[in-house]
Image (tube, helix red, strand yellow):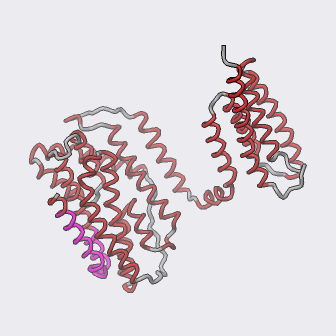
């Protein structure tokens, strides 16, 4: 037989929490309608508090008389809410049912408390209150959301939640190198990073400065930003220095992104790359900040990066490139040893760093037990070769597309950073 005193204490605590959670939601709803005359509101702090308490009592009674009581009380509450809603419609002509849904949730929070799920009920109540309290902010964000961005968010959910749940997680083909789940997981990872970078720039806005734009645009495509800013520097030579700071910020962001991916997939590889990556990042960010502080003149031209947050065709293309690089890495390693992998890294780095980084980080994960293993050293050198090649390509693009206006402020820091990073890796 259960201890009645302990059981009563548990029930009292459940009712107290039910009342508190109802009061929490009720305070927010009451504050919204605080200027209305008493009695003119359908529900406020007292009503929501009582609804939470009602849910708690219903949950406690259900343990003795059956769970049908919860359904019956929920039905009664719904009928009362519908009657109140129809009556208020005659006066306010407000079609919103947000408060009614909030009241149903408050009742269920009480039921959860009675069932002993106090933490779950509290978390749900806080989130509900937060949603209710940020009506204007949510609607404002929705008004700013473009159709292409909404499509991108849905596509990201499609390629992550849906695709990852159906792809087989085993190797196919030669060397069993083609694992559909792992390849697509890496596609989702890069797409998510680009997605975050796109919205970081959109939320922050280019009005915060070109260096801010470059900093977060580097998460999605530092090459695209380099080409765009280089063309602006050609058309507006007087702005070349401030545009150079944005390019350097974007190019510098590539290195922490590479390090993040390595740590996520293979922490042992990431630990080897920490020192050279930090050195290269600092040697790029430092001149970017110096140039920005010295040339903080406003840029009158509108900065439009014209990036797409996510395209399925781009994701599929990246997945195909990733698969090809995985197979090529095995072929070249078997044929030419480490030199073949370095050649592949240089070729891949001319256009993209992510694919070769993901490939080598995954392949060297089996060697992660021995941090100083030959395969980890090979992977770290190859990744830096790819990053260095990509940086030099962007330096060439900046200089060429800007009609040499960005030759000194962009090319020199990138070349110095590349040499210092490679030297630090060889020394360590």
Which percent across, then down, holds residue 187?
36, 47
Span highlighted in magenta in the image: 394-423
Q: Is residue 401 magenta?
A: yes
Quadrant including the N terminus: top right
Residue at image point 40% right, 83% down: 295
234 above or below 267?
Answer: below
Quadrant including the C terminus: bottom left
Which is more toward the observer, 388 or 117?
117
198 above or below 246?
Answer: above
Work out which residue is located at the far front of the displayed protein and give it.
Answer: 5
Image check: 277 left or right of 52? left
Which percent across, then down, holds residue 327?
21, 43
Give the tally of numbered discs: 0
Which is more toward the observer, 193 or 316?
193
Residue at image point 40% right, 80% down: 293
Work out which residue is located at the far bottom of the displayed protein and give it.
Answer: 238
Q: Which image quadrant is residue 362 in?
A: top left
Which is more toward the observer, 341 or 281?
281
213 above or below 167?
Answer: below
Q: Is residue 354 magenta?
A: no
Q: Which image quadrant is residue 353 in?
A: bottom left
Residue at image point 41% right, 38% down: 164
Which percent across, then down, holds residue 267?
29, 46
Which percent across, then down, holds residue 142?
62, 57
Image check: 331 left or right of 43? left
Predominant SS of the magenta segment: helix
Work out which residue is located at the far top of the displayed protein and give it.
Answer: 1
Image check: 96 left or right of 118? right
């Amino acid at each position: 037989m259960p201890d009645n005193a302990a059981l009563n204490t548990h029930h009292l605590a459940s009712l107290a929490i039910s009342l508190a959670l109802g009061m929490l939601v009720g305070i927010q709803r009451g504050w919204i309608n605080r200027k209305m005359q008493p009695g003119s509101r359908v529900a406020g702090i007292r009503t929501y508090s009582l609804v939470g308490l009602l849910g708690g009592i219903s949950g406690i009674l259900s343990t003795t008389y059956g769970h049908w009581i919860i359904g019956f009380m929920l039905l009664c509450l719904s009928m009362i809410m519908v009657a109140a809603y129809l009556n208020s419609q005659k006066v306010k002509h407000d079609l919103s049912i947000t408060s009614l849904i909030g009241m149903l949730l408050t009742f269920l929070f009480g039921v959860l408390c009675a069932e002993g799920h106090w933490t779950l009920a509290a978390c749900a109540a806080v989130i509900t209150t937060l949603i209710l309290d940020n009506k204007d902010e949510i609607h404002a964000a929705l008004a700013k959301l473009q159709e292409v961005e909404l499509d991108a968010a849905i596509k990201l959910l499609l390629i992550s939640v849906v695709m990852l749940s159906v792809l087989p997680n085993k190797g196919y083909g030669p060397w069993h190198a083609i694992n559909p789940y792992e390849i697509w997981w890496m596609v989702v990872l890069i797409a998510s990073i680009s997605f975050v970078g796109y919205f970081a720039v959109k939320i922050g806005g280019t009005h915060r400065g070109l260096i801010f734009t470059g900093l977060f645009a580097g998460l999605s495509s530092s090459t695209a930003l380099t080409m765009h800013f280089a063309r602006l520097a050609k058309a507006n030579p007087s702005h070349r220095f401030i545009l150079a700071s944005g390019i350097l910020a974007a190019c510098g962001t590539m290195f922490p992104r590479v390090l993040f991916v390595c740590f996520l997939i293979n922490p042992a590889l990431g630990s080897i790359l920490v020192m050279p990556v930090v050195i290269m990042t600092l040697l790029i960010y430092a001149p970017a900040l110096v140039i920005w502080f010295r040339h903080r003149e406003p840029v009158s031209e509108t900065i439009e990066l014209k990036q797409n947050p996510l395209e399925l065709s781009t994701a599929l293309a990246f997945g195909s490139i990733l698969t090809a690089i995985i197979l090529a890495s095995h072929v070249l390693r078997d044929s030419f040893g480490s030199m073949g992998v370095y050649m592949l890294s240089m070729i891949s780095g001319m256009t993209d760093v992510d694919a070769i980084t993901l490939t080598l980080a995954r392949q060297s994960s089996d060697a992660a037990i021995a941090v100083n293993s030959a395969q980890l050293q090979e992977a770290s050198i190859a990744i830096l070769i790819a990053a260095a090649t990509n940086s030099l390509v962007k330096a060439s693009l900046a200089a060429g597309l800007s009609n040499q206006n960005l030759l000194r402020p962009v090319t020199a820091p990138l070349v110095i950073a590349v040499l210092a990073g490679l030297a630090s890796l060889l020394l360590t």
